[in-house]
Image: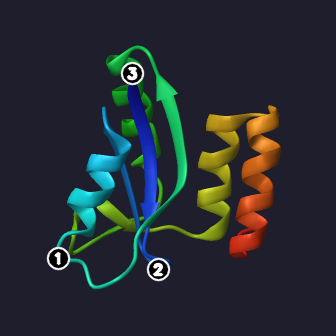
Amino acid sequence: MTYLYILTDGQLYKIGITNNLDARLKQNQTGNPYRLWYVLNVAYRDRSEAERIEAWALRFGRPTGGGSEWRELSVSELRKIRNALTGQSWLGRVLGAVFGWLGVK
């Protein structure tokens, strides 16, 4: 299983893919003074599909000095990515509640 994820420190967002969410979070957290967490992760059986969607998602926002995967995303850009990846499923409703809790409308 391959996961497309959006990771944040509350300011910047990292869009990427991994086969192991726990290991990827630990890897990104190492040396980072800010607590990181996933705001979204979606599982794909086909890695090439995850890569294609990652390339689409990386078109949003503005890359920062942390590399092309770390970027500034507006609330509307984050919402657009979330809606495209989750649709109107139960997961979308759950994520909507979580995003609301985080202050993302």
Q: Residue at x 30, y 37 (%)?
A: 18
Q: Which residue is mark 3?
A: 1
- Callout 1 secondary element: loop
Q: Is residue 85 visible?
A: yes
Q: Given contact means CB atoms under 8 Å apart, are the residues at marks 1 and 2 in contact? A: no
The quadrant of the image that shows the N terminus is: top left
Specify few, some or many for label 2: CA neighbours under 10 Å numbering under 14, 14-19, or 20 or more: few
Q: Is residue 68 visible?
A: no
Mark 1–mark 2 Cα distance, whole angstroms, equals 17 Å
Amino acid identity at mark 3: Met
From the viewer's perspective, is 71 left or right of 101?
Answer: left
Callout 2: SS: loop
Which numbered circle lies on residue 18?
A: none
- Looking at the picture, does residue 62 appear above or below residue 89? below
The mark nearer the N terminus, 2 or 3, is: 3
Q: Pointer 2: what residue?
A: 11
Q: Nearer the viewer, residue 35 or 86?
A: 35
- Seen from the viewer's position, the closer of residues 59 and 18 is 18
Query: Which residue does the numbered mark 1 point to in the structure image?
Result: 31
Give 52 or 104, whichever is nearer the viewer.
104
N-term mark: 1 or 2: 2
For image coordinates 78% across by 54% down, the residue present is: 96
Where is residue 57? Give x, y as percent. Answer: 46, 44
Alpha carbons under labels 2 and 3: distance apart: 28 Å
